[in-house]
Amino acid sequence: QLEFNQPETKAETLPMEEPNPAAGIAGDLVAVETVSDAEPELSPERQLLTAAILNLEEQEYLSAWTNLRKLSQPNIEHEVDAWIGYCLTQLENLGQAQYHFERAQPELDGSGILWHNIGCCQSQLSKHHLAVESYSNALKCNPYCYQSYQQSALAKTRLAMRDGTALPVDALDDIESALALASDDPYLFYDAARIYAYGMTSNPELADQCRRHTRRSLELGISTTSFKGLFPTDFGFQGLVPTDLPESAPARKTAALFLPPPFDLHEVMKELP
């Protein structure tokens, strides 16, 4: 039986929220005119956002999450929620990530990336039927996002495997649409090979396409061990392995996509006092 499992998700233990040092200050402040060449001090909200931007640039997602969640300006809450969701996907806290992506109003995001990222959370939480709907919404916004086709095909395949049914034709349509849009992503071809491998169990005529995608993924650096146990013995896997194996493919990135320009935190900064 083919193994086609989701990567394990880990519940992230998140720290308790620290009190806002700017909150609860009592007493009247007297304005005093002074003459100084010093730069004006940033407001607490701007300090938090500046720190979060630096954290994201350094891929320090726990620190970015800590700073972002302290921001309380209502006029930037959707952008902040989107970035909190992204940080939580990197921290593998997928239930909370989905919650924040949904709060960020994906129906107003013309890029479709919020819908895509919601689908990624749902897929990794084994809610494949909901994920299929989310990827469909993402592709209505952007029909040129190959990652959404790729993840939609995987979700449909996992549903078929769970139910013990044949691979649906629209899963093949999705993965072929993804392949038509991207020709150098090793994990796209690897996923295509896995999808076709499952399709072969009910339709042996898919074997040639499966071999083609398998060979291409090997040429792009996917290791031979990644295919262990995937194919029947008469598939001819060894004959597909390149004579000179290329360098290993880079580590697979999370399926969630980085947020687009409408969520640019430098622009958000302009909305803060």
Image (cartoon, rainbow, N blue to C red):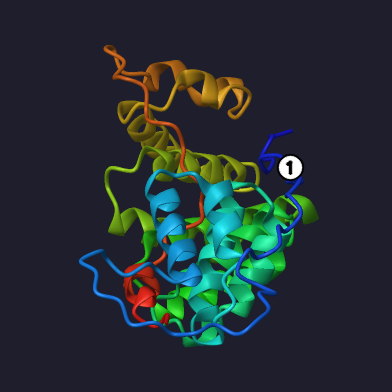
Q: Residues within 10 Å of mark 1 (few under 14, many from 20)?
A: few
Closer to us: 42 or 157: 42
Amino acid bearing label 1: Lys
- Residue at 55% across, 22% down: 234
x, y percentage for residue 263? 40, 73
- Residue at 37% across, 65% down: 145
Relative to residue 9, is residue 236 depicted above or below? above
Q: Secondary structure at mark 1?
A: loop
Relative to residue 42, is residue 207 depicted above or below? above
- Residue at 77% across, 52% down: 162
Relative to residue 160, is residue 92 depicted above or below? above
Is residue 37 visible in this depiction of the protein?
A: yes
x, y percentage for residue 3? 69, 34
Which of the 4 image quadrants contains residue 268?
A: bottom left
Work out which quarter of the rendered image holds the C terminus and state it: bottom left
Q: Is residue 12 left or right of residue 102?
A: right
The residue at the far top in this view is 243
Work out which quarter of the rendered image holds the N terminus and state it: top right
Residue at image mark 1: 10
Is residue 173 visible in this depiction of the protein?
A: no
- Residue at 31% across, 15% down: 245
x, y percentage for residue 126? 74, 55
